[in-house]
Image: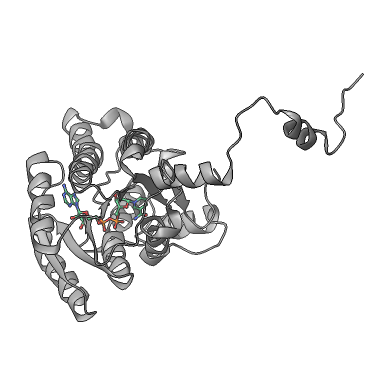
């Protein structure tokens, strides 16, 4: 015979469990004082890696609009783009610098954090956005392909997370750390396997950092875009097209029509809006999460 609880019995039972410790309003407040991040510091500063173009640029501009002063990072090859983003931010009335550094090199990331702090002030937010993609069949991957993918997408994120966290701990005021994952951190794309694996690593590392940073009032989250029309997807479209005999632009169009519930390719601002939430005070009680922003491709 099936056992059924009366509709309110679970609630009533929990009310009767008087032996268990209860969180009173006062205790909840004490706990909040210990752990909740106050991101209401003014002015706030953020480092956004890989922000000379694409999603990173949209994030840098959005955070400037939110009141942040920004350290715009990219590699030397993208110096002109980085300088343009800095000018755009300054024209919005906020302060900005560019810092050219390869995120896969820990010493360069450490110097970037140091420079950002001395030029802009204490570091409140790190957005480890820089990443690379490569389209290649698993059995064609070379040791160098795998190594570079993990150096940039995984070591790069670790370098940014850890250098920012050490600075934030030294400052003592908490902070927000974010990383770029992807929908492929939930379900890999064929021919993007090592890229997918690197993004799974970002998701895992984000959860681990969230646990270890919580006592320092630092929240750690990741964002997982879907198919965003940037230089990265130009490359993926072109390379998948070559392998599948499709013309330029056809693959992204097909993926958009077949996969995205909302029926349009994403733009970088779709992602920067979510990052704005994750770097703002409304997400103070969110940590260890990888938030999907893909128009409805994967459902978590
Ligand atoms: P993008 O290629 O347009 O921009 C990435 C930027 O990162 C470039 O300016 C590049 O120069 C920079 N970069 C690369 N290696 C670097 C390094 N070692 N050090 C510093 N900067 C470096 O790509 P995007 O589409 O704007 O992607 C941004 C992030 O979002 C990436 O991590 C990417 O994997 C992720 N993402 C993108 C999509 C998408 O559809 N475009 C989807 C999911 C996740």
Which residue is more in the foreground, 63 or 135? 63
Q: For the point 21% across and 36% down, which residue is it? A: 155
Where residue 39 appears, as percent x and y from the top left, is 34, 58
On the rendered structure, is 219 left or right of 296? left
Where residue 37 appears, as percent x and y from the top left, is 37, 51
| Quarter of the rendering containing residue 121 | bottom left
Q: How many marks?
A: 0
Q: Quadrant of the N terminus?
A: top right
Q: Is residue 189 visible?
A: no
On the rendered structure, is 178 left or right of 261? left
Q: Is residue 24 above or below residue 4?
A: below
Q: Quadrant of the C terminus?
A: top right
Instruction: State the residue lying farthest toward the right.
Output: 1
Which residue is more in the foreground, 276 or 83? 276
Instruction: State the residue lying farthest toward the top.
Output: 1
Q: Is residue 153 above or below residue 226?
A: above
Q: For the point 10% across and 68% down, which residue is it? A: 80
| Quarter of the rendering containing residue 89 | bottom left
Q: For the point 40% across and 55% down, which residue is it? A: 278
Q: Is residue 214 above or below residue 4?
A: below
Where residue 90 appears, as percent x and y from the top left, is 18, 76
């Amino acid at each position: 015979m099936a056992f059924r609880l009366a509709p309110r019995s679970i609630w009533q039972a929990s009310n009767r469990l008087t032996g268990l410790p209860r969180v009173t309003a006062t205790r909840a407040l004490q706990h909040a004082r210990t752990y909740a991040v106050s991101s209401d510091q003014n002015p706030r500063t953020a480092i956004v890696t890989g922000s000379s173009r694409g999603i990173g640029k949209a994030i840098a501009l959005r955070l400037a609009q939110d009141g942040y002063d920004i350290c715009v990072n990219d590699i030397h090859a993208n110096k002109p783009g980085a300088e343009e983003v800095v000018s755009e931010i300054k024209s919005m009335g906020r302060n900005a610098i560019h810092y050219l550094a390869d995120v896969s090199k820990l010493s360069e990331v450490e110097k970037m954090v140091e420079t950002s702090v001395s030029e802009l002030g204490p570091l409140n937010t790190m957005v480890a956005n820089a990443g690379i993609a490569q389209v290649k069949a698993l059995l064609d991957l070379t040791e160098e392909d795998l190594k570079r993918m993990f150096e940039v997408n995984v070591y790069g994120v670790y370098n940014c997370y850890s250098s920012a966290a050490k600075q934030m701990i030294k400052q003592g005021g908490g902070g927000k750390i974010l990383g770029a994952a992807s929908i492929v951190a939930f379900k890999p794309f064929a021919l993007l396997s090592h890229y997918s694996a690197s993004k799974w690593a970002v998701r895992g590392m984000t959860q681990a950092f969230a646990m270890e940073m919580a006592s320092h009032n630092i929240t750690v989250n990741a964002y997982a875009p879907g198919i965003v029309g940037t230089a990265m997807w130009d490359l993926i479209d072109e390379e998948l097209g070559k392998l599948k005999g499709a013309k330029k632009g056809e693959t992204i169009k097909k993926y958009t029509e077949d996969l995205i519930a909302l029926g349009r390719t994403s733009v970088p601002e779709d992602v920067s809006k979510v990052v704005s939430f994750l770097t703002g005070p409304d997400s103070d009680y969110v940590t260890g999460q990888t938030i999907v922003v893909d128009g409805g491709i994967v459902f978590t």
